[in-house]
Image (cartoon, rainbow, N blue to C red):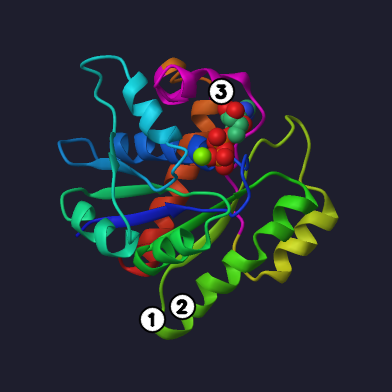
């Protein structure tokens, strides 16, 4: 079985689908070849599936797979066939989120740099830590999403994040039209502007994700 990376947050609009699609493409490029990366759409809203349907024909892009419930029973079967399986999580869905945590090697938690997004991740962090106490897995990290270009993370936000005792990736996505455009085209920023700033952000996040997986031995 390959590695399962779940992109989760109970709040909508924090950038799960944007991160999941771009990261899956980044992982696919990092380990080129058939079966390198797929996305499991675990959200009934189906953003990733629609993104998959919008992919240009014959494009070498991550396949998007939809699975039935319970996710913890279905995802491992999918992950058998891929080096990396990126799960695009659902907002406001405790059962689905728990099921994803149960089978994830790594959980990435995208949060916009605001208190509201951080507080909303409290429950998820407790679920992650609960499984970790029993099994040592999953690894987890926050990924700042939609940061305003040219600003640093505010001190108060860093302080709150530290209290969760999970790492925060150095790599983050900034607020850039390129992300929204790529998503609606069925592409990623690695395809629309491979040498652009957004692509560099995704590459950094991809590297840190690979490192996180290496640290957990998966
Ligand atoms: N870094 C970013 N820059 C600009 N727009 C973004 C960025 N990340 C997400 N968005 C936009 O914000 C909205 C919500 O993002 P999405 O990834 O769908 O969040 P979620 O899956 O958590 O609900 C979408 O319209 C998306 O295009
Ligand atoms: Mg989504």
Taking the spot 51% from the left edge, 35% from the top edge, the residue there is 18
Category of crowding for the residue at label 3, using alpha-carbon neighbours closer than 10 angstroms: few (below 14), some (14–19), many (at least 20): some
Where does label 2 land, which residue? Answer: 132
Q: Image height check: is 27 above or below 188? A: below
Category of crowding for the residue at label 1, using alpha-carbon neighbours closer than 10 angstroms: few (below 14), some (14–19), many (at least 20): few
Taking the spot 48% from the left edge, 24% from the top edge, the residue there is 183
- Marks 1 and 3 in Cβ contact (< 8 Å): no
Where does label 3 land, which residue? Answer: 180
Relative side of 170 to 5, left or right = right
- Marks 2 and 1 in Cβ contact (< 8 Å): yes
Quarter holding residue 137: bottom left
**Mark 3 Cβ and ligand 1 under 8 Å apart:** yes
Name the spot of residue 58 as percent of width and height, x first: 20, 16
Identify the secondary structure beneath mark 2.
helix
Identify the secondary structure beneath mark 1.
helix
Closer to us: 140 or 79: 79
Q: Which residues are magenta?
A: 168-191
Taking the spot 29% from the left edge, 33% from the top edge, the residue there is 62
Q: Quadrant of the C terminus?
A: bottom left
CA–CA distance between discs 2 and 1?
A: 5 Å
Identify the secondary structure beneath mark 3.
helix
């Amino acid at each position: 079985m390959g590695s399962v990376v779940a992109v989760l947050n109970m709040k909508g609009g924090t950038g799960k689908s944007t991160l999941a699609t771009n990261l899956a493409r980044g992982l696919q490029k990092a380990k080129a070849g058939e079966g390198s990366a797929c996305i499991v759409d675990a959200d009934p809203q189906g953003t990733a599936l629609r993104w998959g349907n919008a992919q240009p024909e014959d494009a070498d892009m991550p396949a998007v797979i939809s699975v039935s419930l319970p996710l913890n029973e279905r995802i491992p079967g999918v992950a058998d066939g891929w080096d990396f399986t990126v799960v695009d999580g659902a907002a406001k869905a405790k059962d689905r989120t728990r099921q994803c945590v149960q089978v994830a090697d790594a959980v990435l938690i995208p949060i916009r740099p605001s208190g509201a997004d951080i507080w909303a991740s409290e429950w998820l962090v407790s679920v992650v830590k609960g499984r970790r106490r029993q099994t040592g897995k999953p690894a987890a990290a926050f990924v700042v999403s939609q940061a305003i270009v040219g600003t640093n993370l505010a001190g108060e936000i860093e302080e709150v994040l530290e209290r969760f005792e999970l790492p925060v990736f150095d790599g983050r996505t900034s607020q850039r039209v390129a992300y929204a455009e790529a998503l609606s085209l069925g592409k990623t920023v690695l395809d629309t502007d491979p040498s652009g700033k957004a692509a560099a952000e995704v590459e950094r996040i991809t590297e840190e994700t690979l490192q996180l997986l290496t640290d957990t031995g998966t």
